[in-house]
Image (cartoon, helix red, strand yellow):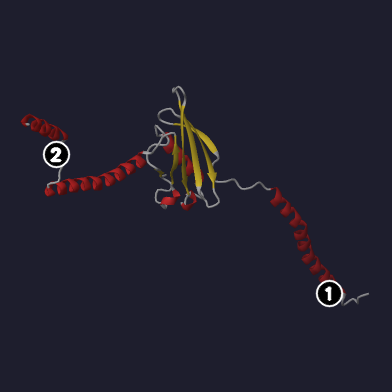
């Protein structure tokens, strides 16, 4: 048995050990609970909304749905039908962008998509108009942060595509016209321009009369 002088020391040592062991035991007992909570906790909700409906200014009934790629590109697919048409006319288009490149998007994603859908509602035709859907929230963000028209069906070409083709046709037509003009001038200067068919017939008739 410890002597009387050692008893206070032993008591203090026991108290110190108890104070150390209690927190350790608590941590060991809480660790499995924390791990279990992590496993059962629901996955964080994505900032990108799933789907919804909208009506355009012209009364087109539309549905929209989003999907997100691994590189952060978000696609907004919109499908619409035009009421009153027989048979029912439908069209659809897809917008795509990387809204997470907008600094404000992380905290205000819902506001961002609300503004995007709001812009589509103001159109007569969802797929016509400006290609880029700029929001007030990300007005000064990089261009990649704005969703833009990527595909459109239901029509052969977009207005922009038609304008581009017209420009290409003009560029192609100018060299052809110049080449034709140069050839005609060269033949005229060399005196090799063939007479008209009518002139040939007339000359033949005159020669027969003289004979």
Residue 6 image offset from top left, x and y in percent: 87, 76
Above or below, comparing residue 70 to residue 10 in the picture: above
Q: Relative to the observer, which residue lies in front, 118 or 5?
A: 118
Q: Relative to the observer, which residue lies in front, 169 or 39?
A: 169
- Of the residues tagged 2 and 1, which is closer to the observer? 2
Q: Which residue is mark 1?
A: 9
Q: Residues within 10 Å of mark 1 (few under 14, many from 20)?
A: few
Q: Relative to the observer, which residue lies in front, 5 or 202?
A: 202
Apparent side of residue 52 relative to residue 167 in the rendered image (left or right): right
* Disc with the residue nearer the chain's start (2 vs 1): 1
Above or below, comparing residue 5 to residue 179 in the picture: below
Q: Secondary structure at mark 1?
A: helix
Residues tagged 2 and 1 counted as in contact (Cβ below 8 A): no
Q: Name the residue rendered at 43%, 27% in the picture.
A: 59
Q: Residues within 10 Å of mark 2 (few under 14, many from 20)?
A: few
Apparent side of residue 60 relative to residue 46 in the rendered image (left or right): left
Instruction: State the count of labels.
Output: 2
Q: Name the residue rendered at 22%, 48% in the picture.
A: 179
Residue furthest front in the image = 211
Q: Can you see residue 48?
A: no
Q: Name the residue rendered at 15%, 36% in the picture.
A: 196
Q: Which mark is residue 195?
A: 2
Quadrant of the snapshot with the C terminus:
top left
Residue 169 image offset from top left, x and y in percent: 30, 43
Q: Secondary structure at mark 2?
A: loop
Residue 94 image offset from top left, x and y in percent: 47, 40
Residue 173 image offset from top left, x and y in percent: 26, 44
Q: Relative to the observer, which residue lies in front, 38 or 132?
A: 132
Q: CA distance from mark 2 to mark 1?
A: 133 Å
Q: Which mark is residue 144?
A: none
């Amino acid at each position: 048995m410890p002597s009387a002088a050692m008893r206070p020391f032993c008591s203090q040592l026991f108290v110190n050990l108890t104070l150390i062991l209690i927190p350790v035991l608590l941590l060991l007992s809480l660790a499995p609970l924390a791990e279990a909570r992590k496993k059962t906790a629901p996955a964080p909700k994505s900032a990108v909304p799933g789907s919804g409906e909208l009506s355009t200014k012209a009364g087109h009934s539309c549905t929209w749905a989003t999907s997100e790629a691994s590189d952060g590109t978000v696609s907004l697919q919109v499908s619409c039908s035009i009421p009153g048409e027989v048979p029912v006319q439908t069209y659809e288009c897809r917008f795509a962008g990387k809204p997470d490149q907008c600094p404000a998007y992380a905290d205000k994603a819902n506001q961002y998509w609300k503004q995007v859908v709001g812009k589509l509602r103001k159109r007569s035709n969802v797929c016509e108009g400006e290609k880029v859907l700029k929001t007030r929230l990300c007005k000064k963000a990089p261009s990649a942060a704005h969703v833009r028209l990527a595909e459109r069906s239901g029509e052969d070409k977009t207005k922009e595509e038609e304008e581009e083709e017209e420009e290409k046709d003009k560029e192609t037509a100018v060299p052809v016209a110049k080449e034709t003009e140069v050839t005609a001038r060269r033949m005229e200067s060399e005196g090799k321009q063939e007479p008209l068919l009518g002139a040939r017939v007339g000359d033949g008739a005159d020669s027969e009369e003289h004979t």
